[in-house]
Image: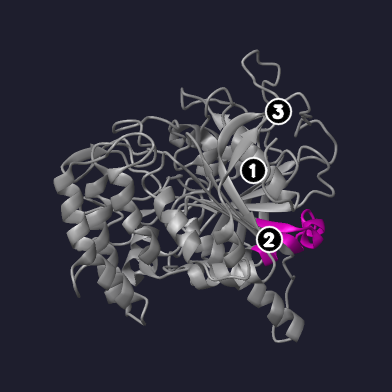
């Protein structure tokens, strides 16, 4: 995910940018001299169709691949259906035009098996401002980028094996999406995603998906997006049922959040503890740890006090200042000179490979109309200005869990930027109908085909798993003799089958 060609400096160290941008030398920082909005370069002329889709079908990209490759690792029970030649199994990409000046890009892949009955899974990357093509091409899509950053290979553990997958670039301005960039909160993003899905599901090509089970899967800033989108969908469904609005109900059954930022007050101490002790190595010196600890605890002006003030009705400026303070004094300096997305590796880690040039090469074939970029700085700055980062999404997550939606929180133990110490503290702070049972559980080993892959807990329809050897993009990694993405695929498959996690 380190896709920029030039390094960004923070804490005196050189790192490449990822899903979480750097501002004024601070990872996840807030720019003090915000640049003017940069209009995206239009590469393909277009005419918007507000309220409708513009679609390219069966582009062949990421569809028929070299399945006969001698380098593949395919499970014995795996069935592959060629997305180009099998009748009724197809892919589509293009735009849903919210308005004449707001267009959201999507890329849809039908399930390889039983697409006519399979559920629909939505995928969102984070940022805020990062493209979901990251998830498609670096993590869990039908093809995965090769080390040459110019070609792709079949992913035998693609999440579209048994689920229809819809990758969405949002908010407007992210990835191939384009137009007026006005969204700066997770709630506003939720409203746009709902509007996009109403457009998508009324289209005759996708209308049959409206009655299917729906899942939201997301990562990173998805710790905000996932709970907020899910809670918004449930509230919209209730409004439709009450007759106060019209629309297509979304049959939400599942929410999955990977390495997510959900509740800063619970998660920020995790940076201190993880930097001091993790499964790999200490990240910084004791003096750096001490300074961060002092910054966390300083009365009234420290990180903890600022997050508390933000979530006690704080204004945008109060919450934005909290983000700036905490990331300047805690998140950034505690990273040391290690890759924040995969700490076993010193900066910069070239894995997962860059996808920028590949997306440029196939842009016109999939209907992309503007230059693709990993993260849109203007969208990120919109969110930084509102302080959305520091506003907790915990109440939304609790609402979704208590509503009976099956929820899984997962993370990789090699990720610093949203490490398992912080995520597990967030999970332990939940107050839901399953929380008492969850806290009574002990971690059980999670095995894939008899091989240890992590540790997990289940309670009712809630699950949590820490996956060993995985960085920030969990499906992009392998552990031991397991294949890349194999553990994440088993997790995904069990949850999508409405099952609690279990070893195999």
**Pair 1/2: label in front:** 2
Look at the image and tell me in which quarter the N terminus lies. Answer: top left
Q: Earlier in the sequence, mark 1 or mark 2?
A: 2
Give the Cα distance between marks 1 and 2.
16 Å
Secondary structure category for the residue under label 3: loop
Q: Quadrant of residue 377?
A: bottom left
Q: Is 2 one of the magenta-colored residues?
A: no
Counting from the top left corner in percent of width and height, residue 309 is at 30, 77
Where does residue 242 sit, x and y in percent of width and height? 74, 85
Given residues 123 and 378, the one toward you in this image is 123
> Of callouts 3 and 2, which one flags the residue occurring earlier in the amino acid sequence?
3
- The residue under label 3 is 64
Q: Of marks 1 and 3, which one's residue comes earlier in the chain?
A: 3
Give x and y (percent) for residue 418: 40, 50
Check disc 2 and report the residue beneath it. Answer: 460
Residue 287 in sight from this viewpoint: yes
Please tell me whether mark 2 sits on a helix, a strand or a loop: loop
Question: Which residue is the site of mark 1?
Answer: 491
Answer yes or no: is residue 35 visible: no
Identify the residue at image location x=73%, y=74%.
247
Question: Is residue 262 rendered to the left or right of residue 144?
Answer: left
* Residue pictured at 22% horizontal, 48% vertical: 333
Query: Which segment is the magenta one?
Result: 197-215
């Amino acid at each position: 995910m380190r896709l920029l060609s030039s390094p960004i400096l923070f804490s005196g160290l050189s790192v490449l940018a990822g899903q979480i941008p750097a501002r004024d030398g601070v990872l996840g920082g807030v720019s003090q001299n915000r640049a003017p909005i940069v209009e995206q370069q239009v590469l393909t002329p277009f005419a918007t169709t507000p309220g409708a889709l513009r679609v390219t079908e069966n582009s062949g990209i990421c569809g028929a691949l070299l399945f006969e490759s001698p380098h593949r690792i395919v499970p014995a029970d795996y069935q592959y259906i060629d997305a180009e030649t099998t009748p009724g199994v197809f892919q589509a990409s293009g735009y849903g035009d919210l308005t004449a000046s707001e267009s959201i890009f999507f890329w849809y892949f039908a399930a390889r098996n039983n697409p006519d009955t399979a559920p629909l899974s939505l995928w969102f990357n984070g940022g805020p401002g990062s493209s979901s093509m990251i998830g498609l091409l670096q993590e869990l899509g039908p093809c995965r980028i090769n080390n040459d950053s110019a070609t792709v290979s079949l992913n035998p553990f693609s999440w579209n094996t048994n689920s229809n997958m819809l990758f969405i670039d949002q908010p407007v301005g992210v990835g191939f999406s384009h137009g007026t960039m006005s969204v700066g909160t997770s709630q506003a993003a939720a409203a746009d995603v709902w509007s996009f899905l109403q457009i998508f599901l009324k289209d005759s090509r996708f209308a049959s998906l409206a009655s299917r089970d729906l899942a939201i899967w997301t990562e990173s800033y998805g710790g905000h997006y996932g709970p907020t989108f899910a809670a918004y969908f449930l509230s919209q469904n209730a409004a439709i049922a009450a007759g106060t609005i019209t629309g297509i109900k979304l049959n939400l059954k599942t929410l999955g959040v990977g390495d997510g930022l959900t509740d800063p007050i619970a998660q920020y101490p995790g940076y201190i503890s993880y930097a001091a002790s993790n499964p790999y190595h200490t990240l910084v010196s004791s003096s750096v740890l001490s300074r961060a600890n002092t910054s966390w605890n300083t009365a009234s002006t420290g990180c903890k006090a600022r997050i508390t003030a933000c979530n006690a009705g704080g204004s945008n400026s109060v919450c934005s200042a909290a983000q700036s303070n905490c990331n300047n004094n805690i998140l950034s300096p505690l990273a040391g000179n290690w890759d924040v997305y995969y700490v076993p590796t010193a900066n910069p880690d070239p894995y997962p490979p860059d996808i920028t040039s590949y997306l440029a090469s196939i842009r016109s074939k999939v209907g992309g109309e503007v230059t693709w970029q990993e993260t849109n700085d203007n969208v990120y700055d919109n969110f930084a200005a509102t302080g959305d980062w520091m506003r907790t999404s915990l109440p939304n997550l609790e609402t979704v869990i208590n509503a009976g939606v099956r929820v899984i929180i997962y993370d990789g133990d090699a990720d610093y930027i949203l490490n398992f110490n912080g995520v597990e503290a967030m999970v332990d702070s939940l107050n839901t109908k399953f929380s008492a049972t969850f806290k009574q559980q002990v971690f059980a080993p999670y095995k894939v085909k008899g091989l240890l892959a992590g540790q997990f807990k289940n309670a009712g329809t809630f699950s949590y798993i820490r996956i060993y050897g995985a960085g920030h993009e969990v499906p992009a990694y392998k552990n031991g003799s397991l294949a890349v993405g194999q553990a994440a695929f088993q997790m995904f498959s069990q949850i999508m089958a409405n099952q609690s996690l279990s070893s195999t």
